[in-house]
């Protein structure tokens, strides 16, 4: 674990893409579900033990001072003013705080909303410098980090517009998550690099490009944050997405509440694949979090979704696990054997809720991935439950739940599943086409009716 005790947050920018909000409110104080972006950052920093926060202010800086003050939840707050915020970029703001870089810091962009788990993962990985990186293929725009086989960053570039749509991205391409843990050795170098660029007049560029220019002189590693919740809020659409991602959507079809319950309440429905379980085991242990709760019937405890995660919990001896309970008798919950059964019943589904209950209660469980359950909400992986919050006991032998399958068997199964997904995507596009046709027809009807009303008047 690194001994980082201070943070730098860059909040000098004008946030023009969030106008008119940012005409009177600094971008970092824009609220996501009633919580200002900067307050969220400070709350998470306090939770991981940061003692000092340096905030570089500019646009409407006094409002930030008045909102936060000089102390926040036990952390000392220091302000540095970028008086040229409207003529410079974030590298200049960072240059103003360069003396703190040399002591080791976690560097944050002031427009990024994130969870504690993500921040803790970046900070606590080990004693090297790390840059949070998500899968670039999910974004196709912004700062891209290219990593080598050892996980160190080999190239940094800014991808915009057409280039992001036409280029193919691979696993070693990462979208900057706007959080960097800078150890003192790198901090000294970065301070020198920023100084060189400022002296040459290059003050209106991203600090990402400064790091890109001198990357061969230092070393930064990528901290994989794929699947963890975060959002860079540049415009109104980003703000809407952040509110959906982090908001409590109580009472809607997207409601995703879970409980931490004794694992004894649950019963398996399907066996699991050995290699899938092995790979999932590594992913969960590397992340240190469970990204989604199990889905189970409240009355019987039968696990309807998340069989591999359920076996993961058993094999590691977890006594309590996160579960989203549903009522399996709800007519809005359906079961089939193919993803297309979500949209169309083509032939017999060859399965029923009655058989699911009988199998789960009797222990005569299905082979892996036989059932396809459809729920009246989206199954979004956004729980981010630390494993440390779950009570652990002795490991359990789970061999009876593991299918006797080879790697080739699993590859064939996954390829068939991918084909199912492709068929469902095609069917979804058909529905989209139909909806657009209906919309255009209704727009025509409204237009004609308005013409008649104008003639009457």
Image (cartoon, helix red, strand yellow):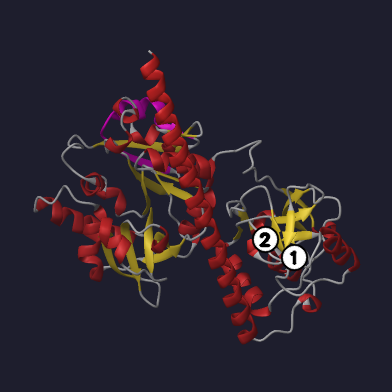
Name which quarter of the figure residue 253 lies in: top right
Residue 325 at x, y percent in the picture: 76, 49
- Residue drawn at the location 13% of the way across and 51% of the way down: 202
Position above or below: 66 against 388: above
Residue 211 at x, y percent in the picture: 25, 61
Query: For the residues marked 2 and 1, what is the alpha-carbon distance in whole angstroms?
Result: 8 Å
Say whether residue 370 is left or right of residue 415.
right
Position above or below: 130 against 68: below
- Nearer-the-camera pick, 457 or 116: 457
**Which residue does the numbered mark 1 point to in the structure image?**
349
Residue 447 at x, y percent in the picture: 40, 30
Say whether residue 439 is left or right of residue 162.
right
Q: Which residues are magenta?
A: 52-72
Say whether residue 76 is left or right of residue 378.
left
Name which quarter of the figure residue 365 lies in: bottom right
User: Which secondary structure lies at badge 2?
Assistant: helix
* Magenta-drawn stretch contains 149: no
Contact flag, marks 2 and 1 (Cβ < 8 Å): yes
Q: Residues within 10 Å of mark 1 (few under 14, many from 20)?
A: some
Q: Residues within 10 Å of mark 2 (few under 14, many from 20)?
A: some
The extreme top residue here reads 457
Asked whether the viewer can see residue 217, the reply is yes
Say whether residue 193 is left or right of residue 50.
left
Position above or below: 124 against 89: below
- Residue drawn at the location 85% of the way across and 64% of the way down: 355
- Nearer-the-camera pick, 67 or 227: 227
**Which residue does the numbered mark 2 point to in the structure image?**
341
Residue 85 at x, y percent in the picture: 21, 37
In the picture, which quadrant includes the C terminus? top left
The extreme right residue here reads 362
Asked whether the viewer can see residue 48, the reply is no
């Amino acid at each position: 674990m690194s001994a980082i005790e201070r943070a730098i947050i860059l909040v000098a920018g004008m946030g023009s893409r969030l106008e008119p909000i940012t005409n009177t409110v600094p971008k970092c104080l824009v609220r996501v579900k009633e919580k200002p972006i900067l307050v969220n950052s400070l709350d998470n920093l306090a939770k991981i033990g940061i003692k000092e926060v340096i905030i570089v202010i500019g646009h409407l800086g006094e409002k930030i001072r008045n909102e936060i003050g000089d102390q926040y939840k036990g952390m000392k707050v220091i302000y540095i003013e970028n008086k040229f915020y409207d003529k410079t970029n974030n590298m200049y703001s960072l240059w103003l705080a360069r003396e703190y870089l040399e002591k080791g810091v976690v560097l944050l962009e002031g427009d990024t909303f994130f969870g504690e788990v993500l921040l803790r993962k970046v900070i606590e990985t080990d004693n090297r410098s790390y840059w949070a990186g998500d899968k670039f293929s999910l974004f196709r725009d912004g700062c891209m980090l290219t990593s080598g086989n050892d996980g160190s960053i080999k190239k940094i570039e800014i991808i915009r517009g057409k280039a992001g749509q036409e280029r193919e991205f691979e696993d070693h391409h990462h979208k900057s998550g706007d959080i960097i843990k800078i150890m003192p050795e790198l901090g000294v170098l970065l301070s020198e690099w920023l100084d060189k660029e400022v002296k040459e007049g290059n003050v209106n560029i991203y600090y990402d490009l400064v790091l890109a220019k001198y990357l061969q002189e230092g070393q930064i590693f990528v901290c994989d944050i794929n699947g963890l919740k975060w959002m860079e809020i540049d415009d109104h659409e980003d703000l809407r997405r952040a509110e959906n991602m982090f908001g409590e959507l109580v009472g809607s079809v997207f409601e995703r509440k879970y409980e931490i319950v004794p694992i004894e309440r649950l019963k398996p429905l399907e066996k699991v694949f050995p290699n899938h379980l092995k790979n999932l085991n590594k992913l969960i242990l590397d992340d240190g979090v469970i990204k989604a709760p199990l889905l189970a019937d409240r009355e019987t405890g039968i696990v309807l979704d998340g069989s591999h995660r359920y076996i993961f919990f058993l094999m590691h001896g977890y006594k309590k696990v996160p579960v989203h309970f549903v009522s399996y008798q709800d007519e809005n919950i359906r079961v089939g054997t193919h993803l297309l059964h979500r949209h169309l019943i083509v032939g017999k589904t060859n399965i029923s809720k009655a058989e699911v209950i009988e199998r789960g209660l009797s222990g005569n469980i299905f082979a892996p991935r036989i059932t396809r359950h459809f729920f009246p909400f989206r199954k979004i992986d956004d729980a981010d439950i630390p494993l440390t919050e779950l009570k652990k006991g002795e490991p359990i032998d789970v061999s009876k739940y593991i299918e006797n399958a080879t790697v080739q068997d699993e590859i064939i199964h996954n390829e068939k599943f991918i084909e199912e997904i492709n068929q469902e995507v095609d069917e979804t596009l058909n529905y989209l086409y139909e909806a657009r046709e209906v919309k255009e027809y209704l727009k025509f009807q409204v237009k004609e009716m308005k013409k008649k009303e104008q003639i009457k008047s």
